[in-house]
Amino acid sequence: MSSIMKHHLFWPLCVLAALLLFNLCYSPDFFSITVHDGHLYGSLIDILNFGAPLILVAIGMTLVVATKGIDLSVGSIVAISGAIACLSISRGADQNSLGLILTSVLLAAGLSLMLGAWNGLLVSGAGIQPIIATLILMVAGRGIAQLITGGQIITVTSTKYAYIGSGSLAALPFSIFVVALVLVIALLLTRRTALGLFIESVGCNPAASKMSGIRAHLVILSVYVFCGLCAGIAGLLLSSNVSSADGNNAGLWYELDAILAVVIGGTSLNGGRFYLTGTVIGALIIQTLTTTIYMIGVPPEITLVVKACVVLAVCLIQSDTFRAAIAARWKSRHYPAEKEMSRHAS
Amino acid sequence: MPLNRKYIPIVVTILLFIVMFTAGSFRYTGFFSLQVLMNLLVDNAFLLITAVGMSFVILSGGIDLSVGSVIALSTMVSASLVQQQGWPPAVVIPLVLLMGAVFGTAMGAIIHYFSIQPFIVTLAGMFLARGLCYVISIDTITIDNTFYTAMAQTRIPLPGGSFLSISAVIAILVVAVAIFTAHYTRFGRNVYALGGSEQSALLMGLPVARTKVLVYTLSGLCSALAGVVFTFYMLSGYGLHAVGFELDTIAAVVIGGTLLTGGVGYVLGTFFGVLIQGVIQTIISFEGTLSSWWTKIVIGLLLFIFILLQRVLSSRRLTLKE
C-alpha cells in the first residue's frame, strides 16, 4: 500500500479521480458517451479534445523545466503559429487544396522551431537566465502575432484545415491522436534512449554533466526547440479548432497553465527528474477543473482562485522546509497531549 | 576621466532616452514641448510606481509577477467599497494600501520561510489576486465619487503653460523616497547585499529574513499605490485592468539597467526605463500609421539589447577578476 502511495502518479491520479467523482455526483450523465454520426460525444471526450493543446504545450514545458529552465514564451508561440498558418491558408486560391494545407502547417511548424531555437540559443549560447530569455519572446511574440494577423482575427473556410483541430478519426477527435503521437515520441526519446538521462543530469548540475562528457549546450538547445515545436503544434490545433487566428488572445495564459500542469505532475521546478505521464495527468486535471467550473455555473474567472490555491498547495508540499516544519509541528502538538494523558493516568 | 563600469548601463539608458526624445522632436512637429515630456509622467505614473517596487525586488534577486493583478484588485476593491458600499475615500485608500502590503508580506514570507522560488509563489499570487477581482464583480464598476473625479481632473500648472496631474506628483515623490531608501538607508544596503549574495549577507549577520519579506511588502505596497493611482486615471474598477502589466514593469526595470540576477542597478535607471517606454508609445502615436503592437516588438527588442549588454559587461567583469 505504501509503495502505491509513494508512486509519483498517486496524488495526481487521486486529484483527477476526486474531480471526476465530484462531477459524477453533480451530474450523473457526466460519464455518458453517445455515438452520433459515427463520432463519440460526451464530457470526457470534450475534456480530452479541449485539453489537447494544453497537454502538448505541457509536454514540451516538462523537458524545459527538467533542465532547470522555464519557457514563458509558449503562449506567444501558440499565437504566432496559428496566425501564420491561417494567414498562409487565407492567401491561397483554393483553401481546401491539400498542398496548401501541408505547406501552411509545415511553415507554422518551421517557424515555431526557429522561435524555440532562438530561446535555446539565448539560454545555452548567451547564458541568459531562462525566465528572462524567454520573457523577450513572450513580450515581442504577441506583437509579432498581431503583426502577422494585422490586428484582425483571420478566419479561414478550409474544411481540411479544420479537420486537424475538430475532425474525427476512428470516432475519436483527431487532436487526441496528435497528442498521443507527440507523447509517444517524447517518451521513446527520453526513456528508451540516453537523452532523458542527459536532460535530468543537465538539470541537476550542468557543470558536472559537462565534465562527464555530456554536451550540455546542445541538450538545452534541443529541449527549447522541442518545446517551441510542441507549442507550435498546439497553436495549429487551437486555431484549426475555431478556424480562425487571434493574435491577441490565442494562447493567453498558456504558459501559466502549462507550468501548473508540470508542477502538479510532480516535476520539480528545481530541475532534474521529470515525469511526462504526470504532466499529462496534470494538464487533464486543469482541463477537468475548468470544465467542472463551467458546469456548476460559477463564473469561469473564479477558476483563477482555485488554480492559485492548487499551485500554492502543490509547491508547499514539494518544499522540504515546509514538510519539515509540518512534521515538527505535528510532533510538538502530540507531545504535550501525551504528557497530559500520562499525568492524568498516574 | 574613465567612466566607472558600473555606471555604463544607466548612462546608456539615459543617453537612449535623450536620443529617442531628440529624434522624435526632429521628426514630428509639436513633439518638442514641455507638455509632451510631462505627459510621459502623467500617462505612466502607475507604471513608474510599480516599477520602483519591482526594482527593489529585482535588486534583491527575486521577481514579482503579481503586480498587475494587485493593481487590478486595488481598483476593484476601491471601486466596490466607494461606489457600492459608500465608504469614504479617506478610509478606502489606506485600506487598499494595507491590503497590498499584507498581500506582499504573505508572499514574501512564503518565499523565505518555505524556500519556494519567488517566481512560482508570485505566480500563484497573480492568479489569486485576479481571481479575487472576479469574486467581487465580473463587470466594470465605474466611479463617480467627487473625490476621485477631483483627483483625476486636477491639473497642477507648471511654468511654460504645461501641467502635471496629482498622480504624476505622487509618482515623483515615490521615486525620490525610493532613491533615498535604496542608497542612504540600512534597508537599501541590505537589499543590495542580499541581491549580491544571499549566503554572504547571511554570514555577515544581515537580517536576511526581514529584508526579503520587506522587499515583497514594499512591492505589494507600491502595486497597491499604483492601483489607487490607476483608479484615478481610469475612474473604474475592472478585473481585466493591467493585464500583462508585470511584463511592462520588468521590462522597464531591465531597460533601466538593473541586473536581473540582483545586486546591481539604480532606481533612477528604472525612472528612465519607464520614460523610454513612454517615449516609444508617444512616437508611435505621433507616427499615426504604426499600430500599437509595434510598441511590444520594440520593447522586446530593447529588452534583448539590454540583457545582452548586461551579459557582455558582467562577463567582462568576471574575466577581469580572473
Image (spheres, helix red, strand yellow):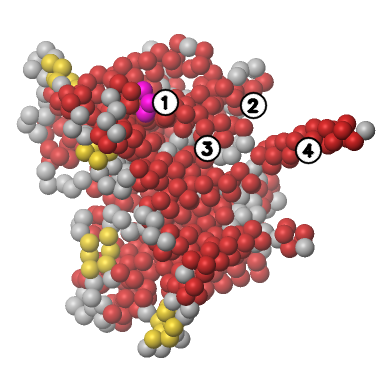
The residue under the point 45% across, 35% down is B64
- Label for residue B199? 2
Which chain is home to disc 3? B
Q: Which stretch is magenta?
A: B94-98
Q: Where is mark 4, residue-wise?
A: A334
Q: Amino acid at mark 1?
A: Leu
Mark before the other along the chain sequence, 3 or 1: 1
Whether A169 is drawn above or below A10: the answer is below
- Label for residue B98? 1
Q: Amino acid at mark 3?
A: Pro
**Residue B60 visible (yes or no):** no
Q: Where is mark 3, residue-wise?
A: B118
The residue under the point 9% across, 34% down is B28
Residue A307: within the magenta?
no
- Asked whether disc 3 touches disc 1, contact meaning CB atoms under 8 Å apart, the reply is no
Q: Indicate which label's residue lies in the foreground, 2 or 1.
A: 1
- For disc 3, the neighbor class at 10 Å (few under 14, some 14 to 19, many from 20) is many
